[in-house]
Image (cartoon, helix red, strand yellow):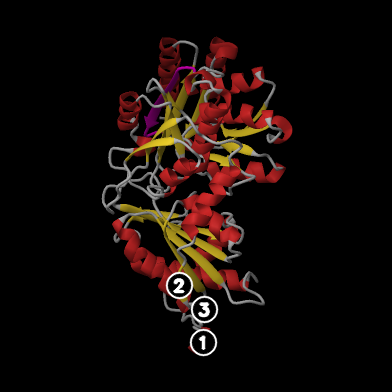
Amino acid sequence: MGRLFGTDGVRGVANADLTAELALGLSVAAAHVLAEAGTFEGHRPVAVVGRDPRASGEFLEAAVVAGLASAGVDVLRVGVLPTPAVAYLTGVLGADLGVMLSASHNAMPDNGIKFFARGGHKLADELEDKIETVYEEHRTGAPWDRPTGAGVGRVNSYDQGFDQYVAHLIGVLPNRLDGLKVVLDEAHGAAARVSPEAFARAGAEIVTIGAEPDGLNINDGCGSTHLGKLQAAVVEHGADLGIAHDGDADRCLAVDHTGAEIDGDQILAVLALAMRERSALRSDTVVATVMSNLGFKLAMEREGLTLLQTAVGDRYVLEEMKRHGYALGGEQSGHVIILDHATTGDGTLTGLLLAARVAQTGRTLQDLASVMERLPQVLINVPDVDKSRVKTSAELSAAVADAERELGSTGRVLLRPSGTEPLVRVMVEAADIDHARSVAGRLADAVKSALG
């Protein structure tokens, strides 16, 4: 079988790929693997379980809770909360394990399971691999060692989690948001209650859209993957800014007072300067991926900040941050990690800190974000090629070198094999969109010629 765990847990179509049986089996396997690793030694184990509002989350949560309790783990059900809230509560409650049921920005039929280790950190890859191996062994017949009597896990609702998480968010803010009018698009997702409550308690006047989840409408034409409604609402209500989350609220994109999009790179730029000002940006360094816009890199250089770039994926950003103790990192897509206050991307926290910077400076978000200029970016997918030879083809290397010489310091080329399909992604940035398109087209032809 293929690897179940991807870069962000186990995902698939709920009740087709991701079944109740799979959710139960993985939960039992996780409990056994962590027990063997010594995580539960000397005490009765506890897990925090949360979910987003998807209808399928109801039966999948029941399966996960049943699996954990059957393996002797006490369960605290925190209900519908964002992924970063589940991670935070796993840490603050001293739980041995956290489980979040969500498929993030994916459409409603999908769902997913993400495990957190003690402290609210992502499980190590080797533990995920072990969980998969153990799950498969028992799926094909090996019996579980099951506790009985008082050894089975107990299940309780933990309703205090909402207030604890909101209080944590408010406590992080360097200043209040009084005087700001903010439109919040909650994607009919996990932050539909948390985000409006946090912004209101912080002093902002709020307008909410996409905040009526019914289990079926998550991410449906709204949220961080569909900014049109937020852009229109910000202009209609004369708001200072708008904030958009995805289904599990681990990411944030923004809209300025004119309705223009502010992407993850621009958000990182604004927060980097704010954190440096209050001596919170350790080593004056920001971590981002190779997909960050060249304009972001040039802005950081101009401001005297160091930009470290990783492979695509917030997990790689987080690994680099933890390895060196950096405080700020993220992705163009809106995953922003503020490591002093969160162990994962936190869209609500990011939005609050962005709004706090607007309130503190008295400047518009448009003005703050102008610290960087987004250079035109062209992306072409070249299908049906041998992606394994991207780094070894002399013909392709020569074409890339020619393109880089042509673009000089005001442009950039990136060739990236897809992780899931037989295609190569060609990305070109340049000061002029027509120039970017021209270079990208020639490189796409070179990929077809060299790898086809």
The quarter of the rendered structure image containing the N terminus is: bottom left
Instruction: Give the residue pinned by disc 2.
Output: 156
The amino acid type found where label 3 is placed reads: Gly
Mark 1 or 3, nearer chain start: 3
Query: Is most of the magenta stretch helix, strand or loop?
Result: strand
Region rendered in magenta: 375-385
The amino acid type found where label 1 is placed reads: Ala
Task: Name the front one of labels 1 and 3.
Answer: 1
- The crowding category of the residue bearing disc 3, from other C-alpha atoms within 10 Å (few below 14, some 14 to 19, many at least 20), is many
Most distant residue in the right direction = 283
Residue 255 shown left or right of residue 127 in the figure: left
Question: Would residue 380 be counted in the magenta stretch?
Answer: yes
- Estimate the x, y position of residue 352 in percent, counting from the top left: 51, 38
- The crowding category of the residue bearing disc 2, from other C-alpha atoms within 10 Å (few below 14, some 14 to 19, many at least 20), is few
Instruction: Give the residue pinned by disc 1.
Output: 150
Most distant residue in the bottom direction = 149
Find out whether the residues at labels 1 and 2 contact each other: C-beta distance under 8 Å.
no
User: Secondary structure beneath disc 2?
Assistant: strand
Can residue 451 be seen in the rendering of this structure?
A: no
Q: Residue at x 50, y 33 (%)?
A: 178
- Estimate the x, y position of residue 295 in percent, counting from the top left: 54, 19
Quarter of the image holding residue 305?
top right
Can residue 198 be seen in the rendering of this structure?
A: yes
As measured in the structure, the alpha-carbon distance from the residue carrying label 1 to the one carrying label 3 is 9 Å
As measured in the structure, the alpha-carbon distance from the residue carrying label 2 to the one carrying label 3 is 14 Å
Instruction: Give the residue pinned by disc 3.
Output: 72
As measured in the structure, the alpha-carbon distance from the residue carrying label 1 to the one carrying label 2 is 15 Å
> Is 371 or 355 nearer to us in this picture?
355
The quarter of the rendered structure image containing the C terminus is: top left
User: Secondary structure beneath disc 3?
Assistant: loop
